[in-house]
């Protein structure tokens, strides 16, 4: 059903890396949510007033906040699709994360208000409910509507990997759960009027559930703004393609910067044979940047590192370094190995990559490497730089 809607309302709907297509997904999802929530708010608020149910009225107000969330998302997708300008040279796509966070804060605010009013009603015995069959029908329809809307958000959000739509999906699922709780409460009170206290009590439980979901969403929508570890499969696929080019001897120092789902910058170092004509190597790098960048829809920048492939001393040192690192962890790597010879000693310089979050003692690794290299030749003076990588 979601794909049918996409096909009808979104031109070239499969090309989700295109800004305009992505914007269209957001607009269609937001407008759909606005229509559903307007209907649900109006009907539930009326039924809640007639029944005198705090739980139903609170649930109707929750739909009103959903309507506000949809409007926020609508403007968010419009702003996120704006092109780069002087003040925002990397575009505006991160606005989508901001709107997701705003939706999360709205959810938390609603939870606090609903919880407070329900607690006060329970304390003051300020409850006078009269449920009818119409109340049950409305709540039942609302549950189905919210489940369908949640599935709609889920499909649209998954299609474009949208944090904002995923937040709206979670909010719809929350509403379906709260509607279900209110429906069960209404049926119980209908048959057992003395259990009037269930109405505000269930409202409190629903408020706590919404509060938990809101806090969880804040954490999820904050992470992309702070900076997330890039998807390992995505990175490995790019590295595999780069390594497939003849003339590429190695890759290191990969850095990923994301300014939105379609605005990704990647820089990396590619090792090439120092004895190959520099113009040929430069042409190779240009081709990789263009072809791999276009394939993945990324801005790829490559630094070319010439490697001395004919120095027999470096061959021996590579074996010593690899063997020493293997004693600590076989996944440890090194790069940029080079030698600078002087009249009294020779500097041996290279970088060692240690994964972020590793509990490995970096000083021990460095000392072990220096000792192993010094044992080979006392004239060797080792200069080691530690690189931390989140890709491992």
Image (cartoon, grey):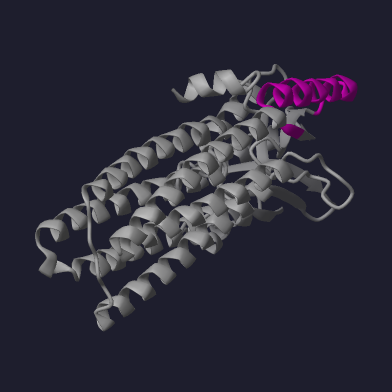
Between 56 and 105, the residue placed more toward the observer is 56
Between 389 and 99, the residue placed more toward the observer is 99
Q: Is 253 above or below relative to 211?
A: above
Can residue 195 be seen here? The reply is yes
Which residue is at the far bottom?
124
Q: Per the image, is 284 magenta?
A: yes
Instruction: Give left or right: position of 179 versus 345.
Output: left
Instruction: Give left or right: position of 248 versus 186.
Output: right
- Magenta region, main secondary structure: helix
Q: Is 29 above or below relative to 173?
A: above
Residue at the image position 61 percent from the left and 52 percent from the top: 99
Residue at the image position 47 percent from the left and 31 percent from the top: 155
Residue 270 rendering spot, x and y as whole percentages:
72, 32
Which quadrant is the N terminus positioned in? top left
Locate residue 200: give its quadrant: bottom left
The magenta-colored residue range is 274-300
Q: Per the image, is 313 magenta?
A: no
């Amino acid at each position: 059903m979601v794909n049918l809607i996409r096909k009808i309302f979104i031109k070239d709907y499969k090309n989700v890396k295109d800004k305009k297509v992505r914007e269209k997904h957001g607009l269609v999802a937001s407008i759909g949510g606005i229509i559903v929530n307007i209907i649900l708010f109006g009907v539930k608020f009326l039924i809640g007033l007639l029944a005198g149910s705090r739980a139903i009225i609170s649930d109707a107000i929750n739909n009103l906040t959903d309507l506000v969330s949809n409007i926020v998302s609508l403007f968010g997708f419009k702003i996120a699709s704006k092109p780069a300008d002087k003040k925002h040279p990397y575009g505006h796509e991160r606005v989508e994360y901001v709107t997701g966070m705003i939706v999360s804060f709205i959810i938390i605010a609603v939870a606090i208000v609903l919880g407070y009013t329900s607690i006060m009603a329970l304390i003051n015995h300020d409850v006078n409910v009269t449920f009818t069959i119409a109340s049950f029908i409305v709540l039942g329809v609302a549950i189905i509507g919210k489940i369908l809307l949640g599935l709609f958000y889920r499909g649209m959000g998954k299609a474009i990997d949208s944090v904002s739509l995923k937040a709206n999906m979670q909010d719809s699922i929350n509403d379906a759960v709260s509607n279900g709780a209110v429906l069960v409460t209404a049926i119980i009170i209908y048959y057992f009027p003395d259990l009037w206290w269930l109405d505000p009590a269930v409202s409190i439980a629903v408020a706590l559930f919404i509060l938990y979901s809101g806090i969880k969403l804040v954490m999820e929508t904050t992470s992309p703004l702070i900076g997330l570890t890039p998807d390992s499969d995505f990175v490995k696929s790019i590295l595999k393609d780069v390594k497939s080019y003849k003339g590429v001897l190695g890759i290191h120092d990969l850095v990923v910067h994301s300014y939105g789902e379609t605005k990704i910058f990647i820089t990396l170092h590619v090792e090439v044979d120092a004895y190959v004509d520099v113009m040929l190597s430069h042409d190779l790098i240009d081709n990789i940047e263009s072809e791999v960048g276009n394939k993945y829809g990324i801005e790829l920048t490559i630094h070319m590192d010439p490697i001395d492939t004919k120095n027999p001393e470096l061959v021996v040192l590579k074996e010593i370094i690899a063997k020493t690192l293997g004693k600590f962890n076989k996944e440890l790597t090194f790069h940029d190995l080079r030698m600078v010879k002087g009249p009294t000693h020779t500097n041996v310089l290279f970088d060692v990559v240690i994964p972020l979050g590793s509990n490995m003692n970096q000083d021990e690794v460095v000392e072990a490497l220096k000792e192993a290299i010094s044992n080979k030749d006392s004239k060797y003076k080792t200069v080691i730089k530690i690189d931390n990588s989140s890709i491992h």
